[in-house]
Amino acid sequence: MRWKRFILLFLVIGSSHTQGAVYYLDNLQGNDDNEGQTAESPWRSLDHAKLRPLFPGDRLLLRRGSTWDESLELRYSGSQASPIVVGAYGDGLPPRVESVYISSNHLILEDIIVDHNKKPGDAIRISESSHISLRHVTARYGTSDGIDIQNSRNIVIQNSLIHHFLGGSFIHQADAHGVVATNTRWLKLQDTEIHHVSGDSFQTDPARNGMLISNDIVIRDCHFWTGPLIEDFNSGWKKTAHLREHERQYPGENAIDTKVAKSNWQAVPRMRILVENLIVHGWKSDNYIRNKAAFNFKEKIEATVVGAKVFDNEIAFRIRGNRGNANVSIKNCMITHSEKAFRIEDNLYHLQITDSYLGSGIQKMLEISGGKSGQKSWLITNNTFVGSKPKVASDPSNRVIRSDSPKK
């Protein structure tokens, strides 16, 4: 009997700790003198909320329909069993803040709009953190990065939307990326859309400090794209969707751009990245950025791309052999309507293209630049080419058909 009472007491205490406290914020009806622990007595400002310590299992909820031109700073940590949750309550549109700064562990941010109001600086910055999940988060309208992740581990971005991060102008494009990761391991993007950024939808380690690289990255079931603007963003970025095709402007450099190390790459570990079921399109040629590519794989990486649909690009895959060689495997992918399906540079080794479909609208299947000494190490098998196949696809398992099948 005593054991039963002890177990019941343990469960009650454990359950209470797991649930934690709940704090409410409402920028219209709230007051920072309130207790903040009921929806009827919410706090008002984010500045006040950040003074309140959060403990494992606590929740900080922002009222739907509220807007704060402030930064949401999250510096307290939950636990594996009881993460801190920052989210929304009430009815209407998700709450909106101007920026988010996260430096913590075991935290979930969900159902929030981060509108950076076309200002410089990152909309969301995650630094020195681990086990952070962003779910149903929108990051939009900035001139720097949408989400900047530094020196972190176990980060998940899921069911989120990142768009309109545009630096400089079309003629003088400045880096403003959708997601950029520096020295970050075990990063996952899932069911997330990124569009209209002037840099890359996703980029790794822009500083190229080879001893502090990102690694074990997964991008799954996402949609990265760009296209002409349908309305003016600022004085540097104007709408061009209404113009004739050759006058339209497509912002951005690449959908995915990998950077690892500028030098001493022999001592650097190989960065691993897995891309599954990515839809990627819109990186068309212009007079300002050379060799615009959906995938720009370079330096010392091990990349696997499975089930991607790649179309309407200048280059579908640009893959380089210098600085440690980009080891790339492409499987079950579909490439159509691109000036070049593959641009292979700098004596690339260990390229694998298998079970893929290279359909109509491809002007050139393969372009080689900077040497081809690694070509004998390539494996190109069991692919379908519309029209003709390049000489490197001489294996009899590669077939040629006259026109596209009914599926695109």
Image (cartoon, rainbow, N blue to C red):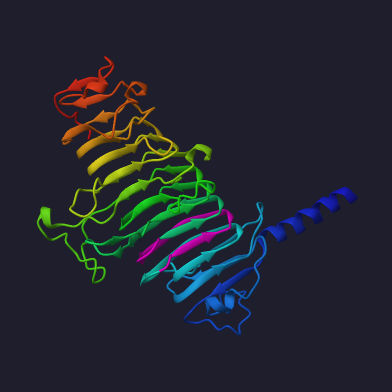
Tell me, yes or no, if residue 93 can be seen here. Answer: no
Image coordinates of residue 10 in percent, x first then y, are: 80, 54
Image coordinates of residue 248 in percent, x first then y, are: 15, 57
> Which residue is located at x 52 percent, y 40 percent?
268
Question: Is 248 left, or right, of 299 in this rendering?
Answer: left
Tell me, yes or no, if residue 256 can be seen here. Answer: yes
Where, by quadrant of the figure, is residue 398 drawn?
top left
The reply to whether the magenta stretch includes residue 70 is no
Out of 14 and 131, give the one closest to the viewer. 131
First to last magenta residue range: 121-145
Where, by quadrant of the figure, is residue 276 drawn?
top left
Question: Is 301 left, or right, of 85 in this rendering?
Answer: left
For residue 261, above or below residue 320? below
Q: Residue furthest top?
A: 396
The reply to whether the magenta stretch includes residue 136 is yes
> Which residue is located at x 30 percent, y 58 percent?
198
Of helix, strand and loop, which mostly describes the magenta segment? strand
Image quarter in which the C terminus is found = top left
For residue 382, above or below residue 219? above
Image coordinates of residue 108 in percent, x first then y, are: 55, 58
Image coordinates of residue 267 in percent, x first then y, are: 53, 39
> Which residue is located at x 30 percent, y 39 percent?
318
For residue 304, above or below residue 218? above
> Which residue is located at x 12 percent, y 57 percent?
247
Out of 195 and 20, give the one closest to the viewer. 195
